[in-house]
Image: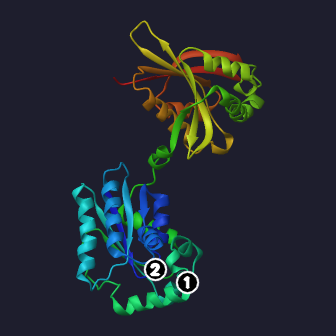
Amino acid sequence: MNLIIISGSGAVGKMTVGQELMKITDYRLFHNHMMIEPVIEIFGKFDGAMINKLREDIFDGFIRSDNEGMIFTFMWAFDMQSDWEYITGVAKKFEESGGTVYWVELVADQAVRLERNKTANRLANKASKRNIEISQDRMIREETKYRLVSREGEIPFEHYIKIDNTNLEPDQVANIIKSHFGLPDKSDRAVARELKLELAREDELEQLLQIQKESFQPLYEKYHDEGSPAIETIERIKARAQAPNRDYYFIVYKGARIGAVNIGYKPSEADETILYISPIFISPKYQNQGFGYLALQAAFRMHPEATKWRLTTILQEPMNCHLYEKCGFVRTGAEEVVKDSMTLIEYEKQCKR
């Protein structure tokens, strides 16, 4: 489990840079005030011991998760031995899990930071900063009481970078960090955790049909085939849903129904378990965002017993063919010419046992 530690003076942009970094990597953000604000709200005052206890629970739980890594922000007083002991102790937790720790220090002119102290994003996430006058005076006091910028060569760690972000936008800083440490691009993992297949009930099939019609309407207008899912009736949908060994599943992302898939099972005499996908569809406003691929991966995980998967698609739709081939399907050679402009082809995916 990897860890990125972003340190710096008050209002230097630690949280905001972390937010931007989370957008372009698989790392999750745990900024300093995520524990500070709840403790102040509940206890009515700052309680460092309670904040650290809650943080420890978050760190321990996160290390056990399947996440790629964490971005943690921290205002580090370099002249305080206790701060060195604390932050290196946090780093050690992640290193002992087999992860790499990346150290980022941000510095910016005080005048710029005083302006950043008033930004809407900062105030929205940090209730204790909303009294601008008090938070500004507290920030100035912290800088006179503690040394919040490291000296040249003071940071001994291998993976370290200091960035003056006085004149840089947060997304620019995030890209500098990502490039400097060679962090991988954001993958499908974060999205996949939010996507699931939910069995559709009979009383939900009308909604499912509406999404299906919207999804297939462009293809129907292009080919005008009488077997198009865009012109299916609710009776046909119900019959398919009630057929033995066939089920409809909504494709759900962050609680929203964005599509559906019908999965059918057919026993085989050759001691095989063959599953059929007919159809799968994504609502137009969610198309071309990778959800079809992730939905198919979810279906594969749902049925580890499958020895083969089969489906048909339109030969003249290269993007659909590309999607299925990306998922491991290959053409079987079976074809059905519906009309001169439209040919249905069969794909099959062999599963490893």
Numbered label attached to residue 12:
2
Q: Quadrant of residue 259?
A: top right
Q: Amino acid at mark 2?
A: Val
* Residue at the spot 52% in from the left edge and 82% down from the top edge: 117
Q: Amino acid at mark 1?
A: Asn
List x then y, in percent, for residue 193: 46, 45
List x then y, in percent, for residue 12: 46, 80
Left or right for 50, reference 279: left
Numbered label attached to residue 131:
1
Q: Is residue 298 above or below residue 61?
A: above
Left or right for 14, reference 337: left
Which part of the image, by quadrant, shows the N terminus?
A: bottom left
* Residue at the spot 56% in from the left edge and 47% down from the top edge: 254
Tell how many labels: 2
Furthest-front residue in this view: 43
* Residue at the spot 68% in from the left edge and 41% down from the top edge: 284
List x then y, in percent, for residue 115: 55, 85
* Residue at the spot 56% in from the left edge and 44% down from the top edge: 253
Camera-nearest label, 2 or 1 = 1
Q: Earlier in the sequence, mark 2 or mark 1?
A: 2
Q: Is residue 225 visible?
A: yes
List x then y, in percent, for residue 61: 33, 54
